[in-house]
Amino acid sequence: MAVSPFSDGTPAASQWPIPPNHFFDYELETTIGMAGTYFYHSHIGFQAVTAAGPLIVEDSGHVPYQYDEERIIALSDVFNNTDAQIESGLQASPFVWSGETANVLVNGKGQLNGSAESPNCELASIDVEPDKTYRFRLIGGTALSFVTLAFEDHDDLILIEADGAYTKPVNTSYLQIGSGQRFSVLFRTKSRSKLSKNQFFMQVETRDRPTMTRSFAVLNYRYKGAKSRRLSSPLIPPLTLPPTTLGWLDYKLESLHPDPAFPLASEVTRRVTIRTHQMITTNTLVWAQDNSPWFETFPSEPYLVSLYKNDSIEFPSYERAIANNGIDPNTRAFPANIGEVLELVIQNTGADSGGLDIHPFHAHGSHYYDLGSGNGTYDPVANEKNIDGVHLAKRDTTMLYKYAATTTPGIDMGWRAWRLRVTEPGVWMIHCHILQHMIMGSVTKLDTAGMQTVWVVGNESEIMTVPADDIQGYLVYGGSVYGNESFDPSPVHFKGTLNSRAT
């Protein structure tokens, strides 16, 4: 979305939400280097729990890894309450938790834990043939769940892609997937002569929640004479999956095509630390970053729209931000200059109650180099030794772990660090990808967004280069770029760069 500034899908940041009974056409220009596994989803409230789906960008030329076929394995959560009930409860006073996931579905299928009706539901079937190599594209479309998964009697997985970027091969027997993350693995099926049966289970278990939820899918071999039965979730799980591996893939995941312009520590212009914290009162729980919850209702219109209209919010001040740990307190935005080399440190801290949680953090607008994670407080000098000689892979969603169940309120207890060269002008968001945490901003607002930050990248001349006359349909709610049954939309066709428009 970096080349289409009004189409990033983040209401109140880059664009207006799509009005009811309207539609918005996304026209994507995919360039060299963007081939990979993605997914689309709503960015309003709790809608993404169901309003989501795979988005695959295929290679147009040489494919660096060879395989026969591919399969999509999309994970999603299902809850016992409706979206509206969950969202209302998370914002209510007194606070009402959503409940834990009733199950992690695979490609929309599964059997609910503890449900008397769900045994009639099917498990997802991943159909394969003997003696073939498959590319399994795994998508973490969950709302809440951080999962570990593996395949019964198939433990030789080769990871080749993370978050839409090819990596050097990494051998693993299992995967850890947080909300928003995507991975591809090469999966070699058994030869016909080595098959003692033709159906195996893929086992999925949630991690770092008060209770563990376990779900299954079926790896189904198809060949002449094979008899496939409809399987239910086994009473005894076939696998013993490991607990959370802290720092899984850190310092091991390398780019398949290393960047010769990788930003060095000596080039870092500034380091911004964002501290995540759960604030608790008698009746409410609020997730905030730097004690500044960000709301979908603040500002009253999207930042990018306001900047073009120059009517409701001033352009964020870089000077005020520098004096205030990176955030401009007047606009509640994080400004950044084109050409800067930023280190962004996301710091986990003990909640007011002393509790801790995990957070899959996601960046819009640009991929970043993931510098790893660790306990306590980030030490840039010590961590530089960890990444020495490692050709770091670019990511867009990585895990902020918790290193204890409880700790002292407010104390540093785990970090995740990124580095990026700032190149894409626009208004972008960085946020925790857990839907509940995004909603839990403040009970004083009807629409809230807790663990989200807005980044305004570039100065006014760099961001607002598209002639205002060309983008009038984006500047009003329900403008001409949104269609309905009565009229077709009139979109703007951005091409090549953020600053140009196709004719």
Image (cartoon, rainbow, N blue to C red):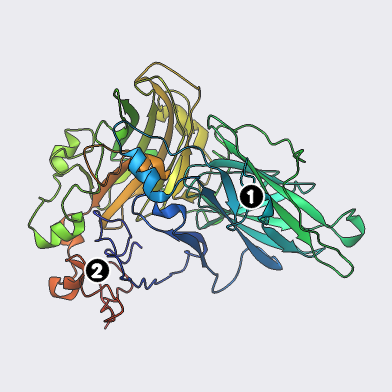
Q: Is residue 467 left or right of residue 448?
A: left
Residue indicated by mark 1: 117
Helix, strand or loop under label 2: loop
Residue indicated by mark 2: 499
Q: Amino acid at mark 1?
A: Glu
In the rendering, at what x and y percent does residue 191 appear? Answer: 86, 60
Total numbered circles: 2
In the rendering, at what x and y percent does residue 344 appear? Answer: 35, 39
N-term mark: 1 or 2: 1
Disc 2 residue crowd, few under 14, some 14–19, many 20+, Cα 10 Å: some
Q: Amino acid at mark 2?
A: Asn
Quadrant of residue 4 within the rendered picture: bottom left
- The residue lying toward the viewer, choosing from 61 and 456, is 456
Q: Is residue 321 left or right of residue 489?
A: left
From the viewer's perspective, is residue 488 above or below residue 373?
Answer: below
In the picture, the disc for residue 290 is: none
In the rendering, at what x and y percent does residue 494 appear? Answer: 29, 73
Instruction: Give the distance between the C-alpha atoms of the residues marked 1 and 2, in whole angstroms.
Output: 54 Å
Quadrant of residue 194 within the rendered picture: bottom right
From the viewer's perspective, is residue 315 above or below residue 1?
Answer: above
* Residue at the limit of the structure toward the front, as seen here: 116
* Residue at the limit of the structure toward the left, as seen here: 311
- The residue lying toward the viewer, choosing from 416 and 399, is 399
